[in-house]
Image: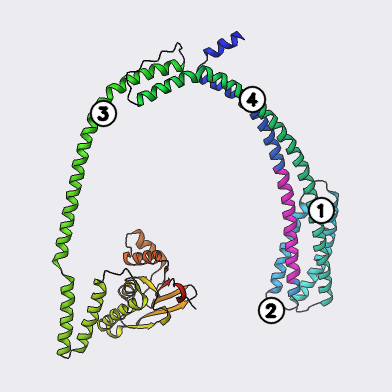
Amino acid sequence: MHGVRQWWVRLSIVNKAIVLSCAFVIPILLVVGLLMNDFYDYREKSNDILSEYARCTDYMNAMEQENALLSELTLAAPGSDTIDKYADAVQDTACAWERLRSAETDGNTQSEVLKQVIDRTMKSYRVRQETFIAQLHGGTFDAVNYEALRTQGSYLTQYTDQLTEAFLMEGREGYLVLGQRGTSQNMVFTIVAAIGSVLFAGAMLYYARSLLLPVQQMSRGARRVADGEYDIEDFNFARSDEIGMLADSFNHLKHQIARTIHALESEAQLEKSLRQQESEAARLRQLIEQSRFAQLQSQINPHFLFNTLQSVANMAGIEQATVTGDMVVRLANFFRYTLDHDDSVVTLDRELALLRDYISLQELRFGERISFEMDCDSRCAACELPKFTLQPIVENSIVHGMRSRSAGGRIRIVTQLAPEGCRIQITDNGGGFSRSKMKQNTAEGHRSIGLQNIAGRIALSGGSFRIVSCPGLGTTARIILPMKGEEHIC
C-alpha cells in the first residue's frame, strides 16, 4: 500500500487524471459496448419486421388500386386510357408481389402458407386477367370473366389482410422478447454505473485532497491580486509537479503585473485623450455635413416652384389655353402631392387621384401611342398603402415596357375587393422580360431600386407585391393590401 502511495505521489497531474479516468471509463465502455451490440440487433430485427410489413402493405395497396381500376372498366368509353391504366396497375401489383414473395419469413409457418395460397391464386388470376385484357383490346367486354376477376381480387385482398395480421403478430412477439432483454440489460448497466460512480467519487475525493487545496490557496491569492493587492506573499509549495510550477509562474506573473500596471495607466490616459479628440473631430464633420445639406436645400425653394406653376395655370386660363392650363394644373397637383411630407401612408383613393393626374400628363405626351384604362372598385377607396406606390409602377411600364412599341401600347389599372384584401393589378402589353434576364441584370448590378423600395414598403405595411412578366407578352404587377375592420367585406 505504501508503494502504491509513493507511485501516486510521483505521478503528474495529467497522469493522475488519466489513471482515474481509465479506472472509471473502461468498465463503462465495456458495458456500453455490450448494450450497443444488443441495440444493433434490436434495430436490425425491427427493420426486418417493418420492411416485411411495408412490402405487404405495398402489395395490398397495389391490389386495391388494380381492383378499383377493374371496376372503372365497366364505365370506360371505347378508346379511353382506362385499359392502359389498368394494365399499368397490373404491372405494379406484379412487382409488389415479387418483392413480397421473395422476402424471407424467418420460419413463420402461417406466413409461408398464406404466401403459397396467394401465389397459387395469383397465377390463376393472371391467366384469367390476360384473357380479359386481350378481349378488351379487341372491343369485347366479357361480363362473366369480369365477375370472376372481381371475386378472385377480393380473395387476394382478404388473404393479404391475413398475411399482414400474421406479420404483425410475429413482430409483436419479437418486440416483447427484445423488450425483456433490454430491461434486464438496463438493470445490469444501472448496477455497474452505480458501483463505478461510488468508486470514482471516492477516488476524486482523494484526488481533491492532494490537488485542490493548493489550487484554492492560489485562487484566493489571485483574487487579492485582482483587487489591487500586488504585495502579497509568494507561494512556496514543497512539490515539483505542475502545482509547484504553477505557483512559481503565479509569483512571476504577480511581479510582472505590478510593473506593467503603471505603464497601462499612463497608456489609458493617453488613449482617453485621443478618443476625446476623435469624438470632437467627428462632431465637427457632422456639423459641416449638416451645413452643406442646408445650403443645398436653400438653393431651390420647392414652394416657389409650386406657386409659379399655379400662376402659369392662371395665365393659361386667361389666355384660353385650356390644354396647357389643364396640364399645368395636373403638374401642380402632382407637385403638391410630392411636397406633402405629413403622410407616409395614404388612402388608395388619394393615390389613384395622383395617378390620374400623372396619366393625363402622359397622354398629352404620348398621344395615341399609349392608351390607359382604369377600373376601380369604390369599396377599396379607404384602403391604406404607402405613399408613391402606384405611380412608379406605371412609370416603369411606360419607360421600360413600352420602349419597343411605336403604337398600340396599353396599360390597364384594376382595383378589386377580394377575400384576402384589396387587390391591385397593373398590366401592360409591352416587351416584358424573362426571369433569366432579370437574374442577369441583378448579378450585373442593374437593379430596379424603385420596385425594390415599393416591395419593401408594401411588405412593412402587411401587404404583398409580385411581378409576373413574359418576353413579348407584357408585364403584370400584383399588389394585395390588407383591409381594416368592417372594410374587409367581399
Q: Is residue 315 above or below residue 386?
A: below
Residue highlighted by disc 2: 79
Label 1 SS: helix
Q: Is residue 423 above or below residue 172?
A: below
Q: Is residue 258 visible?
A: yes
Q: Residues within 10 Å of mark 2 (few under 14, many from 20)?
A: few
Residue highlighted by disc 4: 198
Q: Residue 265 — which label?
A: none
Q: CA distance from mark 4 to mark 3?
A: 50 Å
Label 3 SS: helix
Q: Residue 264 — which label?
A: 3
> Magenta residues?
43-69
Callout 3 amino acid:
Leu
Q: CA distance from mark 1 to mark 4?
A: 49 Å
Residue 409 vs residue 47: left or right?
Answer: left
Q: Residues within 10 Å of mark 3 (few under 14, many from 20)?
A: few
Between circles 2 and 1, the one closer to the viewer is 1
Residue 121 vs residue 355: left or right?
Answer: right
Q: Tell me where residue 54 sits by quadrant.
A: bottom right
Q: CA distance from mark 2 to mark 1?
A: 43 Å
Residue highlighted by disc 1: 166
Pick whichever, 186 or 431, lies toward us. 186
Callout 2 amino acid:
Gly
Q: Name the residue rendered at 82%, 55% in the picture.
A: 115
Q: Are marks 2 and 4 in contact (CB under 8 Å)?
A: no
Earlier sequence position, callout 4 versus callout 3: 4
Q: Residues within 10 Å of mark 4 (few under 14, many from 20)?
A: few
